[in-house]
């Protein structure tokens, strides 16, 4: 019964997305990158490449500032500050305008199925390295709009060993913000570090997610990361969704071979890249509708939703760092954005996976109570600025043939048509109200020189105010990324040469699943 219901609802979503989102969806190549705000972008790039085997694209290192970028990054917060009569700095906005003294710096690292963009906001008026010093106070995943990146560990790796080694190497490398949660209660962080190898991750061998191993951790700037390993049923269901979507990942690719970057990283380089970008919403169906109807994602079917994630092991694994912090500070866990999922009667977590071409956006709803219709769990950020260290944005990859500005205008219009207020892009020029009508060329302008020549970007807030970007890689930028992907053995639907579907790379794997577009709901 439950299964049937889901099936009907996903057909409904599909029908809607076909009628409304066709041109937008057909101009997106999935997720170009997750942007992460760090304390030190080059040090973060070092961690992602040394530890996890990513390729640091040093020919794409960048720094920029100016009024256009100030508006594009922070228009919503600037307008808010203006209406409150306060300095934008009080809302977490570093002044990267022509008159200010900060700039954006960044690095790209490449994984099997996408990039991570590591940015920092640093003072540009001194040779010293001074980062914009705003940290997210509530670092846990229970906070509204909190984002996380989930990395995909290979299925033949010993998961606990992987976590153990990643932690050991991070400690040895002096990355003291890299902290792992445990499934067992620990009195303090030192004891948590000493946990036995067998307690490092959670492996589920029955239930909806049979075959999934996962662990929660923080990255080098305290950003929220997660690790997934999938075998058995979970891998089967993921595989089915990728085949149906014609999505790309190295996990299901024929004749896959490790590159030198992964080999150099050893055990902790044994990954398939990225598996999800997570973001917390206060309206599950609204968010799913936005990603599927407006942007054309494919909602993954049964059994990929959390309906029984309760118990101490989940509680510890999700919130251990924050629980220890709350204890140290003497604040109530609840006031620290920590849900109670230790028992069936506490709070409830739901989520849906919205698959794009290369990985999915996970929308999570945390409920205060145990029914989905209950009020949203109250934890919230006081800010929306991407300049907070540890914050993240998801960047959608726009076809280089498309008109980026037109596409963004279409996204705004469709979102509004469907009743999603506030889904508005920042402009290049100053405006009086967010989303104000401007000429199309004032939505964004590409870089015409430097390492980012041919790159263009737009910042927008999603359904719950989550940070979202639309980016385009044209000219030199596109060539550099394509070349790096080919050298790394990465996959993307953006180029013929990087898309295994063009040479039958998934034929063997997908032959055991229904053909794309076929009715898949019959038992
Ligand atoms: C930032 O990271 C680089 C590369 O690891 C390092 O050389 C530099 O000292 C770091 N800066 C600061 C202020 O920590
Ligand atoms: C953790 O392990 C170290 C080294 O084995 C030991 O010195 C320390 O006492 C342990 N700490 C705790 C809290 O168990
Ligand atoms: C996966 O399936 C194999 C074979 O049935 C079984 O031995 C193993 O325990 C399963 N692993 C998980 C994590 O469910
Ligand atoms: C939000 O701001 C209010 C007042 O400015 C403060 O009391 C509260 O602790 C802040 N909440 C968070 C989650 O930072």
Image (cartoon, helix red, strand yellow):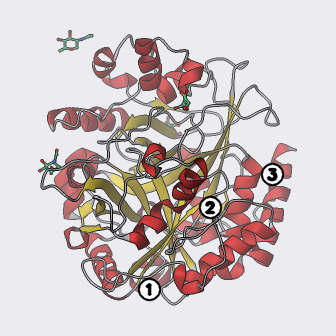
Quadrant of the snapshot with the C terminus: bottom right
Horizontal arrangement in the rendering, residue 448 relative to residue 182 (left or right):
left
Q: Position of residue 218 (x, y in %)?
A: 37, 37
Q: Please say if 233 is above or below 487.
A: above
Disc 1 target residue: 496
Disc 3 target residue: 6
In-front residue for pair 146/413:
413
Q: Position of residue 178 (x, y in %)?
A: 30, 35
Q: Please say if 59 is above or below 366.
A: below
Disc 2 target residue: 241
Quadrant of the snapshot with the N terminus: top right
Instruction: Determine the CA span between mark 2 and mark 3.
Output: 15 Å
Q: Please say if 69 is above or below 202.
A: below
Q: Position of residue 355 (x, y in %)?
A: 60, 61
Q: Secondary structure at mark 3?
A: helix
Q: Is residue 491 visible?
A: no
In-front residue for pair 8/507:
8
In-front residue for pair 90/450:
90
Q: 10 Å neighbourhood of mark 2: few (<14), some, or many (≥20)?
A: many
Horizontal arrangement in the rendering, residue 199 relative to residue 362 (left or right):
left
Q: Secondary structure at mark 1?
A: helix
Instruction: Determine the CA span between mark 3 and mark 1.
Output: 34 Å
């Amino acid at each position: 019964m439950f299964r049937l219901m889901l099936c009907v609802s996903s057909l409904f979503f599909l029908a809607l997305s076909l009628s409304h989102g066709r041109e937008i969806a057909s101009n997106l190549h999935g997720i170009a990158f997750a942007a992460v705000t760090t304390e030190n972008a080059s040090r973060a790039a070092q961690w992602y490449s040394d530890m996890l085997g990513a390729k640091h694209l040093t020919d794409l290192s960048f720094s920029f500032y100016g009024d256009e970028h100030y508006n594009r990054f922070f228009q919503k917060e600037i307008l808010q500050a203006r209406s409150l009569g306060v300095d934008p700095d009080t809302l977490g906005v570093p002044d990267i305008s022509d008159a200010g003294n900060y700039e954006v710096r960044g690095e790209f690292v490449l994984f099997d199925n996408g990039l991570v963009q590591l940015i920092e906001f640093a003072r540009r008026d001194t040779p010293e390295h001074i980062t914009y010093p705003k940290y997210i106070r509530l670092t846990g995943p229970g906070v509204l709009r909190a984002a996380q990146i989930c990395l995909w560990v290979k299925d033949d790796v010993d998961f606990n060993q992987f976590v153990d080694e990643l932690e050991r190497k991070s400690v040895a490398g002096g990355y003291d913000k890299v902290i792992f949660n445990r499934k067992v209660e620990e009195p303090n962080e030192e004891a948590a570090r000493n946990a036995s190898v067998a307690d490092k991750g959670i492996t589920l061998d029955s239930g909806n997610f049979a075959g999934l191993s996962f662990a929660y951790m923080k990255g080098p700037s305290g950003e929220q990361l997660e690790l997934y390993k999938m075998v058995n049923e979970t891998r089967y269901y993921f595989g089915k969704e990728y085949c149906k979507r014609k999505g790309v990942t190295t996990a299901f690719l024929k004749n896959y071979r490790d590159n030198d970057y992964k080999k150099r990283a050893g055990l902790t380089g044994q990954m398939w890249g990225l598996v999800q970008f997570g973001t917390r919403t206060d309206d599950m169906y609204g968010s799913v509708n936005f990603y599927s109807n407006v942007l054309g994602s494919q909602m993954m079917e049964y059994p990929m939703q959390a309906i029984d994630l309760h118990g101490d092991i989940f509680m510890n694994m999700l919130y251990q760092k924050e629980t220890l912090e709350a204890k140290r500070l003497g604040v109530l866990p609840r006031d620290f954005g920590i849900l109670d999922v230790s028992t069936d009667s506490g709070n409830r977590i739901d989520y849906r996976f919205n698959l794009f071409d290369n990985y999915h956006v996970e929308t999570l709803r945390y409920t205060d109570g145990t029914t989905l219709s209950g009020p949203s769990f109250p934890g919230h950020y006081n800010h929306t600025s991407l300049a907070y260290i540890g914050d993240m944005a998801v960047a959608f990859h726009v076809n280089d043939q498309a008109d980026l500005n037109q596409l963004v205008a279409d996204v705004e219009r469709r979102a509004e048509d469907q009743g999603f207020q506030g889904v508005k892009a920042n402009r290049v020029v100053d405006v009086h109200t967010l989303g104000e009508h401007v000429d199309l060329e004032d939505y964004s302008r590409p870089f015409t020189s430097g390492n980012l020549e041919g790159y263009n970007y737009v910042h927008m807030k999603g359904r719950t105010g989550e940070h979202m970007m639309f980016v385009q890689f044209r000219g030199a930028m596109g060539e550099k990324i394509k070349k790096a992907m080919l050298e790394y053995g990465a996959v993307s639907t953006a180029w013929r040469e990087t898309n295994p579907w063009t040479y039958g790379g998934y034929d063997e794997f997908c032959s055991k699943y229904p053909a794309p577009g076929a009715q898949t709901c019959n038992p």
